[in-house]
Image (cartoon, rainbow, N blue to C red):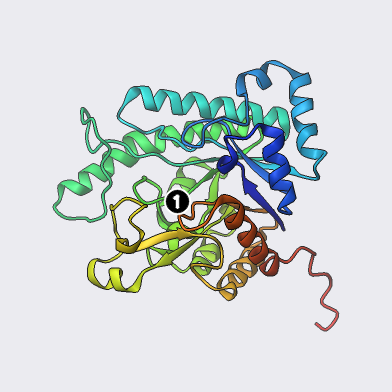
Amino acid sequence: MQIGILSVPYQDLPFEQALDKIAGLGATAVEIGTGGYPGSHHCPVDELLASAEKRKAYLQMVASRGMIISAFSCHYDPLSPDPKIARESDVVFNKSARLAEEMGVPVINVLSGLPAGAPGDMRPNWVTCPWPPHFLETLDYQWNKIGIPYWSRAAEVAQSHGVKIGVEMHPGMLIYNVETMLRMRAAAGPALGCNFDPSHLFWNGVDPVAAIRKLGDAIVHVHGKDVYLDPYNIAVNGCNDHKPYSQIPERAWTFRSIGYGHDIKVWKDIVSALRMVGYDYVISIEHEDGLMSFDEGMAKGMTALKDAVALESPGEMFWA
């Protein structure tokens, strides 16, 4: 298993300086944004699609620092009722799939997006309850008329380019937990997989180890990000919390660097479960800790993961 870093926190640096930072922290993989919410600050997608020489030089910049590109990330909202956003999301996804094939990058990380509640609505609608009954009508529309048709087509695109889609299960999206992830995968096919991020599961009361064992080979990429759950605020208001991320003392939960939300034993259990289901690729650190600088948060996360991750294959069980 390898440890990587999502380059977005270093988006203000030129690409090679960002790579130097990431390699200097001990990463052997880098995850790079190709548009959408992550932006494409380090990846001139159109230029790279147009030039084999530029693609070769780009890959050499990564390889010369002892790293691979673990994934391209273009999280956005292809199911949005805003046609401009939906169209932009789809264009970015398709370009990312083409570029991934050309550059030998095996995974494209995305969000599922969220449709409106009914035809003609202009805002997405996230349903979390089966009552009143119109919520079930909304879910039927979102899944059968919008979500499944789009992601089935997208999975065909990914398969045609020889890449996998890594959907990040994220609250506020159509795919937000294991059940919704596996439902869409069953409909769209095996090219649609999971970018497993335990941080969003922790604050929903999900045990990441149980989730990993249920997902199995649906996991195609992993994010390393932790969450602190504030027991006092949760005791009063529960875990759903729309207060700004900056209001840390008042929030139910806050993204933290690895080890600052859950101790290292939890992360060792996560890594062991990943190995148990056959995942032996990259854990990519995603820094969104409002209490630590990028450099310090990345460094502490890297130290914690190095303690948790098994780098070598287990070998033969001579005792069995």
The image position of residue 191, as x and y in percent, is 58, 41
Residue 108 located left or right of residue 244: right
Badge 1 marks a residue whose secondary structure is: loop
Numbered label tally: 1
Location of the C terminus (image quadrant): bottom right
Extreme top residue here?
A: 50
The image position of residue 267, as x and y in percent, is 58, 69
Residue 42 located left or right of residue 57: left
Foreground of the two, 221 or 137: 221
Give, as a three-letter code, the residue at label 1: Met
Location of the N terminus (image quadrant): bottom right
Residue 35 located left or right of residue 234: right
Foreground of the two, 249 or 19: 249
Residue on which the image places disc 1:
169
Residue 299 located left or right of residue 189: right
Name the quadrant containing residue 205.
bottom left
Residue at left offset 29%, top offset 57%: 241
Extreme left residue here?
A: 132
Q: Is residue 269 visible?
A: yes
